[in-house]
Image (tube, rainbow, N blue to C red):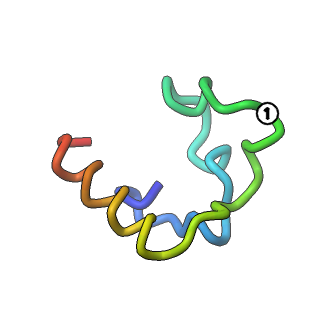
Amino acid sequence: MMSHHISPYQYGPGVVGSTPMTRLVDPLWLNTPAPYGPLFMEGDGLLTDLAGH
């Protein structure tokens, strides 16, 4: 979501639609914003960028 400039603190993963990754998310969490702190999310975003996603 961060690579699409969508705030994970305002939206759940369901906002990006049906993708191979969102199909793995339990429906309970599809519309739930991230419970993680900003340091974790920045690190996660960095790893996603390094992976070329």
Front residue of this view, candidates 41 and 7: 41
- Residue 8 occupies quadrant: bottom right
30 shown above or below 3: above
> Element at badge 1?
helix
Q: How many marks?
A: 1
Residue underneath mark 1? 27
Residue drawn at x 75%, y 55% as measured from the top left: 32
Q: Tell me the residue at 56%/46% (across/down).
A: 16
- Residue 9 rendering spot, x and y as whole percentages: 62, 70
Residue at the extreme bottom: 38
Residue at image position (48%, 76%) is: 38
Tell me: 20 left or right of 49.
right
Q: Is residue 31 above or below residue 51?
A: below
Q: Quadrant of the C terminus?
A: top left
Residue 1 percent across, percent down from the top left = 47, 54
In this view, the residue in front, 14 or 43, is 43
Q: Given the image, on which type of amino acid does mark 1 rest?
A: Pro
Figure check: 19 above or below 39 = above
Mark 1: few/some/many CA within 10 Å (<14, 14-19, 20+): few
**Residue 42 picture location, percent across and down:** 36, 69
- Residues 5 and 21: in front is 21
x 52%, y 29%: residue: 19
Q: Is residue 4 left or right of residue 51?
A: right
Residue at the right extreme, as displayed: 28
User: Who is closer to the viewer here, 52 or 37?
Assistant: 37
Q: Quadrant of residue 44?
A: bottom left
